[in-house]
């Protein structure tokens, strides 16, 4: 289970991500269920919706994926 502080930190980090990175992270997310959004579908979503979707994936899987140093800015 994710701790409150971990969730807050994840929200802080993904709040800086732009569309391309959000789409990449959603499409490469490893989950116990299929994550099969098309690139075209994700491209038409606003960044806030993409952030919400990525956060929901993390919360559903009860884990934070490993983040690259460039993603921590």
Image (tube, rainbow, N blue to C red):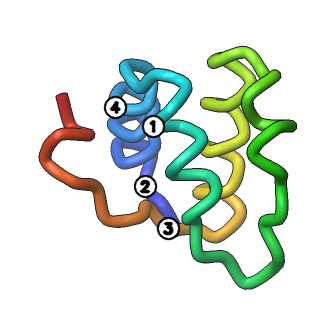
> How far separated are the C-alphas under marks 4 and 2?
16 Å
Mark 1 vs mark 2: in front: 1
Instruction: Give yes or no for contact between labels 2 and 3 (Cβ–Cβ under 8 Å).
Output: no
The outermost residue toward the left is 69
Image spot of residue 12 (x, y percent): 36, 26
21, 72: nearer the viewer: 21
Q: Tag 4 or tag 3, which sits nearer the N-term? A: 4
Q: Is mark 3 on a helix, strand or loop?
A: loop
Q: What element carries label 1?
A: helix
Q: Tag 2 or tag 4, which sits nearer the N-term? A: 2
Mark 3 vs mark 4: in front: 4
> How far separated are the C-alphas under marks 1 and 2?
24 Å
- The residue that mark 4 highlights is 13
Q: Which residue is drawn at 68% across and 31% down?
A: 50
Q: Tag 1 or tag 4, which sits nearer the N-term? A: 4
Q: Residue at x 68, y 56 (%)?
A: 57
* Rendered image: mark on residue 57: none
Q: What element carries label 2?
A: loop
Instruction: Give yes or no for contact between labels 4 and 1 (Cβ–Cβ under 8 Å).
Output: no
- The residue that mark 2 highlights is 3
- The residue that mark 1 highlights is 21
Image spot of residue 62 (x, y percent): 58, 68
- The residue that mark 3 highlights is 63
User: Quarter-wise, where is residue 59 in the image?
Assistant: bottom right
User: Quarter-wise, where is residue 39 in the image?
Assistant: top right
> How far separated are the C-alphas under marks 2 and 3?
10 Å
Image spot of residue 17 (x, y percent): 41, 26
How many marks overall?
4
Mark 4 vs mark 1: in front: 1
Mark 3 vs mark 1: in front: 1
For this view, does 49 lie left or right of residue 72?
Answer: right
């Amino acid at each position: 289970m994710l701790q409150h502080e971990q969730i807050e930190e994840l929200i802080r980090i993904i709040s800086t991500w732009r569309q391309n990175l959000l789409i990449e992270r959603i499409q490469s997310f490893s989950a116990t269920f299929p994550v099969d959004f098309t690139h075209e579908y994700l491209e038409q979503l606003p960044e806030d919706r993409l952030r919400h979707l990525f956060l929901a994936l993390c919360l559903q899987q009860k884990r934070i994926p490993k983040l690259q140093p460039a993603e921590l800015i």
